[in-house]
Image: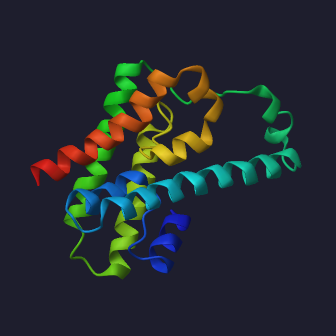
Amino acid sequence: YGFTVLHGLTLPGSACNPCGTLQPMWGGGIPLGMGGVKICAQFLAAGLARLFMSFVWSLEMAEPHFGALSQGCSHPMRTSELQAFCIELLFSVVFQLTALRVERVSPKYKVHLVALLITMLVYAGGNLTGAIFNPALASSLHPNCFYEQFFSYSLVYWIAPSLGKFLILDVF
């Protein structure tokens, strides 16, 4: 919650999720090339965050970090692929509907509404899919899983959030 509020207050209008960049691209608000650059930057930032996280974990400052990097893939999906796809799709739709609904709300209140929603979605589905609904974040958190099960992870963590975004943009 705190990091989302901090991000919203200090970097208004920025998107850390490729699905968030798709909306202005789809609506013609930004050129296709600029949207592509933003999405590439989001994946690059997620990759750099992964490297930094690996460095911090290698310091083994906390007990859960001891040997965690050598364990390889820790699968975030604790349910079937179909259920995981539906959860990520639903969370993406709920998030996008809320984002459209709070566009006219004062920024000092909007950041708290968005942060609360993200926190609730992660709490509701985090134990089943990780409640990521962000393709860049999913690639960063579970890169080894993507290599091992590329199709199912692409379907759940890339296609479902993007499809949710496009469904909302097409309907509204």
Q: Position of residue 156 (x, y in %)?
A: 41, 30
Does residue 18 show up? Answer: yes
- Residue 116, placed above or below residue 58: below
- Residue 78, placed above or below residue 88: above
Residue that sits furthest to the front in the current view: 33
Q: Is residue 45 left or right of residue 88?
A: right
Q: Which residue is drawn at the image coordinates 39% and 72% (left, top)?
A: 111
Q: Position of residue 120 (x, y in %)?
A: 41, 51
- Residue 37, placed above or below residue 151: below
Q: Which residue is drawn at the image coordinates 19% and 44% (left, top)?
A: 167
Residue that sits furthest to the left in the current view: 171
Which of the 4 image quarters holds residue 104?
bottom left
Looking at the rendered structure, the number of numbered marks drawn on it comes to: 0
Q: Position of residue 163 (x, y in %)?
A: 27, 39
Q: Nearer the viewer, residue 81 or 135?
A: 135
- Residue 146, placed above or below residue 165: above
Q: Is residue 96 left or right of residue 69?
A: left
Q: Nearer the viewer, residue 105 or 23?
A: 23
Q: Nearer the viewer, residue 12 or 117?
A: 12
Q: Nearer the viewer, residue 70 or 107?
A: 70
Q: Which residue is drawn at the image coordinates 47% and 30% (left, top)?
A: 128
Q: Position of residue 69 (x, y in %)?
A: 79, 35
Q: Is residue 154 left or right of residue 168?
A: right
Does residue 75 show up? Answer: no
Q: Which residue is drawn at the image coordinates 31% and 55% (left, top)?
A: 22
